[in-house]
């Protein structure tokens, strides 16, 4: 028996092509639409058995808001997400929103059809390996960078970042000035600006805040990458940048 369904996709042409293919296989397609607030409303008003929801960015915040609304207002509608090779977190987000399945959008029409039938029967329509990856991601999430460190780093100019790193290394105003080839008064001004932007009252507090938020690691990484790139360019086709201790090549 055919499935009564709707097809919603980021690209209307893809939605219409998939709808046509499913009609030829005996299914009843109520509508094919592009995703929008109106598309979710259309699904709610038509109440299909299955909704195929295509998305190009399953990990994007709000990507599954239509699923949430559909399941809230029409809990009997089974939603199957069609998306790209997904991240486990994208699959987890789809199921958390109430989806019944996740199918790669390069799947053959037979695979999409099987997912529809399973979803209508109340089963999870997702490849076992994708489901396993999603659970692994939820149980063992990757460490996320400290957003506070990134925010603080954006407040500082490159010059102020260097000053902060020198402060963290324990340098006083005289050493900072000498190391950066600037006047002590200029170094003192830079330090005061760093303290003001970080909203701390002392150099010690600034160093502690930078270390706690990972700001120092981010700053060090940002300085190392350009240095490595310069070194690579200097060595290309130029023996002046080569290690002088390297032995000369043997005569041919």
Image (tube, rainbow, N blue to C red):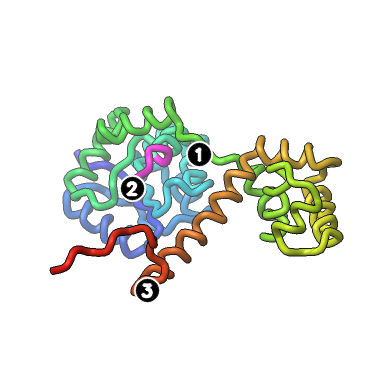
Q: Which residue is mark 2?
A: 82
- Going from the N terminus, do you reach mark 2 or mark 1 first? 1
Q: Position of residue 197 (x, y in %)?
A: 79, 51
Q: Which residue is mark 3?
A: 238
- Compare residues 62 and 77 and report the one nearer the observer: 62
Left or right? Give the position of 237 relative to 203: left
Quadrant of residue 11 within the rendered picture: bottom left
- Going from the N terminus, do you reach mark 1 or mark 3 first? 1
Q: Position of residue 3 (x, y in %)?
A: 26, 42
Q: Which residue is mark 1?
A: 68
Q: Secondary structure at mark 3?
A: loop
As for residue 88 lying within the magenta part, the answer is: yes
Q: Residues within 10 Å of mark 1 (few under 14, many from 20)?
A: some
Q: Secondary structure at mark 2?
A: strand
- Compare residues 114 and 82 and report the one nearer the observer: 82
Give, as a single range, the part of the protein colored magenta.
82-90
């Amino acid at each position: 028996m055919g499935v009564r369904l709707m097809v919603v996709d980021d690209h209307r042409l893809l939605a219409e092509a998939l709808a046509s293919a499913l009609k030829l296989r005996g299914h009843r397609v109520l509508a094919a639409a592009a995703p929008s607030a109106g598309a979710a409303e259309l699904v709610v008003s038509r109440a299909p058995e299955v909704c195929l929801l295509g998305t190009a960015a399953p990990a994007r915040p709000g990507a599954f808001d239509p699923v949430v609304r559909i399941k809230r207002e029409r809990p009997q509608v089974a939603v199957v997400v069609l998306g790209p090779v997904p991240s486990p977190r994208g699959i987890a987000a789809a199921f958390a929103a109430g989806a019944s399945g996740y199918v790669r959008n390069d799947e053959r029409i037979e695979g999409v059809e099987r997912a529809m039938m399973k979803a209508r029967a109340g089963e999870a329509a997702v490849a076992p390996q994708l489901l396993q990856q999603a659970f692994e991601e939820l149980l063992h999430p990757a460490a996320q960078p400290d957003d506070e460190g990134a925010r603080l780093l954006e407040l500082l100019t490159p010059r102020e970042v260097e000053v902060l790193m020198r402060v963290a290394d324990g340098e006083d105003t005289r050493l900072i000035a000498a190391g950066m080839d600037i006047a002590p008064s200029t170094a003192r001004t830079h330090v005061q600006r760093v303290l003001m932007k970080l909203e701390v009252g002392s150099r010690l507090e600034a160093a502690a805040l930078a270390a706690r938020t990972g700001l120092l690691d981010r700053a060090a990484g940002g300085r190392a990458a350009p240095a490595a790139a310069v070194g690579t360019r200097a060595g290309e086709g130029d023996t002046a940048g080569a290690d002088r201790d390297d032995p000369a090549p043997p005569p041919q």
